[in-house]
Amino acid sequence: MLTGKQRSYLKSLANKLKPMAQLGKEGISESFLSQMNALLEHHEIVKVNVLDNSLEDATAAAHDVGKALDAEFVQAIGNKFTIYRQSRENPILEIPGADNTRVKTNLMKKNQKPSDKVRLSKKGGRISKPLKGKKSRPKKLK
């Protein structure tokens, strides 16, 4: 369950988004749910456009999709709705007031430098390390 502040934060993020999926006259089908599942896994917050020839209302469709995909309803305005679900593989969004430990560990894993990896060039050869000798000092002018 999202609190009011968390929902308003997600609304502010969704304001900039363009709809990533469309709900047409077929309604909520298995193919639509699999597409939404993939979008939620990759983006975590998804805006959907409900077409005019669809038989469903945007709010009712959002609640049905959220229930089917274990996602949270964020907002519905006109014929568009937004839903959110934290990614199971690669969480990105930090929600204020929520448990963001998975997001922080994921960011730490991404920012870790691979220490023992062998660097390879584009052609597949090893890249040599630069010389670690003394640097020449500039001569003093008299």
Image: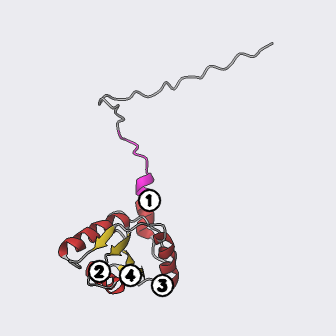
Give the mark, 1 or 4, whose residue is nearer the N terminus.
Answer: 4
- Residue 107: numbered disc: 1
Q: Secondary structure at mark 3?
A: loop
Q: Which tag is nearer the camera, tag 3 or tag 4?
A: 4
The answer to whether mark 2 and mark 3 are in CB contact below 8 A is no
Front: mark 2 or 3: 2
Amino acid beneath label 4: Phe
Q: How far apart are the alpha carbons under marks 3 and 4?
A: 12 Å
Percent coordinates x, y for residue 134 in the rendering: 58, 22
- Calculate the distance from the C-alpha at mark 2 to the C-alpha at mark 3: 20 Å
Residue 113 among those drawn in magenta: yes
Q: Earlier in the sequence, mark 3 or mark 4?
A: 3
Q: Are marks 3 and 1 in contact (CB under 8 Å)?
A: no
User: How far apart are labels 4 and 2 at the CA level?
Assistant: 9 Å
Q: Is residue 11 visible?
A: yes
Give the residue at mark 4.
73
Q: Residue at x 41, y 43 (%)?
A: 115
- Is the residue 132 above or below the residue 91 in the image? above
Q: How is the image coloured?
A: secondary structure
Residue lying at the far front of the rendered structure: 53
Q: Looking at numbered disc 3 in the image, what kind of residue is underneath it?
A: Thr
Residue shown at 23% from the left, 72% from the top:
32
Sequence-wise, the earlier of marks 2 and 3 is 3
Magenta stretch: give its range: 107-117
10 Å neighbourhood of mark 2: few (<14), some, or many (≥20)? many
Q: In 3D space, how far apart are the residues under numbered discs 2 and 1 (Cα atoms)?
A: 29 Å
- Amino acid type, label 2: Val
